[in-house]
Amino acid sequence: MSPHPPTGASAGPAALAAVAAGGAAGALLRWSVGEVVTTGNALVVATAVVNVVGSFALAALPALRVVRRTPLLQLGLGPGLLGGFTTLSAASEQTRSLLDAGRVPAAAALVVLTLGASLAAVALARRRWPQEQHR
């Protein structure tokens, strides 16, 4: 699902409100994970899990007929909710922190595993719900 408005959706007030509301909800969910999981390695793992789950969910959204047929829902759930939930910035900051602490292998593992697992999650979702079934 593209972060750009789907066909039939305009960049009008309703589209902006859908992305803003979804983004706020996603950001609150992401922040809540950080509040629950606050310690070093667990926080790094939690960030990776958030990104992988969010990547899978974003790739799976088109499998839901109601999402495909409702442009504002696509915007609210895709770039809104899941865009606010997943976080490259937190993963990047955690990688920098690991590097500063001299934990180069852990930093490299975080980058490789987060990206690899996120891409695998997208591939899994697309294999489960192929794009051509969404028409």
Image (tube, rainbow, N blue to C red):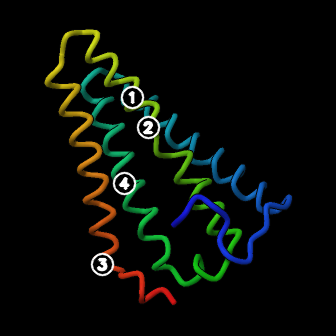
Mark 3, residues whose alpha carbon is within 10 Å: few (<14), some, or many (≥20)? Answer: few
Q: CA distance from mark 4 to mark 3?
A: 15 Å
Q: CA distance from mark 3 to mark 1?
A: 30 Å
Give above or below for 133 relative to 47: below
* 86 or 116, nearer to the observer: 116
Give above or below for 93 relative to 1: above
Mark found first going from the N terminus, 4 or 3:
4
Mark found first going from the N terminus, 2 or 3:
2
Q: Circle 3 is placed at which residue position?
A: 128
Q: CA distance from mark 4 to mark 2?
A: 13 Å
Image quadrant of residue 42? top left
Mark 4, residues whose alpha carbon is within 10 Å: few (<14), some, or many (≥20)? Answer: some
Q: CA distance from mark 2 to mark 3?
A: 25 Å
What residue appears at the point 36 percent right and 82 percent down from the top-left corner?
130
Give above or below for 11 relative to 46: below
Q: Circle 1 is placed at which residue position?
A: 92
Residue furthest to the top in view is: 101
Mark 2, residues whose alpha carbon is within 10 Å: few (<14), some, or many (≥20)? Answer: some
Residue 105, position as x, y percentages in the image: 13, 24
Q: Circle 4 is placed at which residue position?
A: 53
Q: Which circle marks residue 88 in the picture?
A: 2
| Marks 2 and 1 close (CB-CB < 8 Å) | yes
Mark 1, residues whose alpha carbon is within 10 Å: few (<14), some, or many (≥20)? Answer: some
Kindly state the secondary structure of the residue where label 4 is placed: helix
